[in-house]
Amino acid sequence: MKKTLALALPSLLLLTGFASAKKYYVPIPTVVSGEVHISLETERPKNSEFLRDVTVTFIPEGRAGAGAVPRILQGCGPGDPSKFCGPSTNREHPLIDLASVVSSGGLAVLEPEEGLALNEIGIFVGKEASTSSSDWELPILDSTKFFAPGGTAYLSGLRKSATASSNVQIFNFGSQSANCSVKILRPKGSTLDHRDGLTVPALGLIRIPDPLRSLTTGAGNTPAAVTCDQPFYVFGAYPTVDRSQTLVHYPQAAFPTAGTATTLLAQSNTFLNCTFNNPVANFSLPFKAGTKYKVLTIDFDARTVDPNDFVVFRNIVGMSRSDPSQRFGKTLFFGNFERFDGNKIKLDLGTPFIEAAVTRSANISGLRFFHFTVTLNAEQKSIRYQIRRSDLTATILEINAGLFNENFGESNGTVPTLQFGLAGVADDAYFPPYGWKFSNLKVVAFK
């Protein structure tokens, strides 16, 4: 989805000795070492394939931006094959892989040539479209997105296990070194631990690898507060050895709270008996106009059964909102289907050009009973997808990934639609889950 960006502050542009009106900043989380792809979607006017250059400067952790060396990366240009533009082959939205310049843990400074817009960036921790990947959106920042000197940025969801602990990165966008402090907080806001006198170099960053040092193993959903005396930003990650379970922590301007719950849908009976004549069920979600929602939870039960005929993929559930300005005419929040003959579950993360998706191995074949839970968290920009046994005694699958489209409420008079099954066979590959029975639907929003 296209991001609208203002211009960056010229006073902060220290890298190359000259001022530029269009520099943008992308924090890169620190994850366990290994393969990482960072895909940038750009946008240019039609018939403007000569617009393709993005100047990229990478600042590693612990360094200042002065003296960092820029490099020019290019999207597809005139005469390049369509596949060079990216998986969508759309020549107005060419993709650029930043991995040749940018690595895990640092700050990327991007300067597109005039007329070329930066729309979206995704980080793929592991091989793209593989069962080992974890896909997350990265913020594209300008000066309007920085936290002001003396302000406070909050991180939520920090956790600690026997093999990993969430880290915290502090980015300084000032022309002088910053003095910062970090507090680890209890759920109601009192302080558990604090560190003062942290120095962050000018236009640079530091990482705190063990912010939960005083907490025991098993701590989860722990908030942190960061304050600096220069314009700043904070970011974090949970760098697990199992890279498919990597998490990214995004900042908030206010202390994180659960919010007030509102039930949008509740049906205790069977709401879809998926047959050839009745393959789909659609529900409009009654979000209130002008209300910002924090979290959405979708719970339902399903009785599965193997297909009688040939199928490739079987659509389970998805959520989208009609939008003619978007590719495919909609904003997709998530889509979900099963690769029947491969015992895999795929979660489409709704990026129309980067085409981020996460695949995991899971066997849900046969006549069985499952409970599904999908949680969209706008503040943490995350989606959690779970399949459990219907008695909730065992987890079959859990996927944690980035929520690329976090505005899942009403927009311009249109509300999202929750879809189960599929109206018909699509592309000779996507089928309704014939024989499945869906029941006990409950959708709750928190605002």
Image (spheres, rainbow, N blue to C red):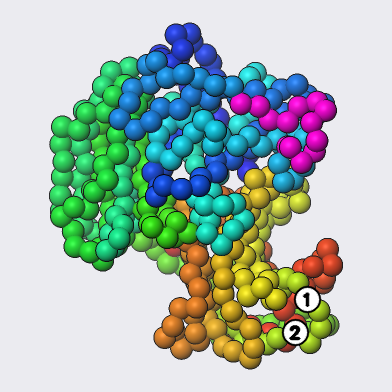
Residue type beneath disc 1: Val
**Quadrant assignment for the N terminus:** top right
84 drawn magenta? yes
Residue receiving disc 2: 307
Q: CA gap, disc 1 to disc 2?
A: 7 Å
**Above or below for 293 versus 341:** above
Q: Residue furthest top?
A: 18
Q: Which of 370 and 229 is in front in this view?
A: 370
Q: Which of the numbered marks, if any, corresponds to residue 311?
A: 1
337 drawn magenta? no
Residue type beneath disc 2: Pro
The percent coordinates of residue 268 (x first, y second) are: 56, 86
Q: How crowded is mark 1: few (under 14 residues within 10 Å), some or many (20 or more)?
A: some
Q: In this view, does 249 lie to the left or right of 301?
A: left
Q: Write the residue at 53% across / 48% down.
A: 124
The percent coordinates of residue 389 (x first, y second) are: 49, 84
Q: Write the residue at 25% across / 36% down.
A: 227
Q: What stretch is highlighted in magenta?
A: 73-85
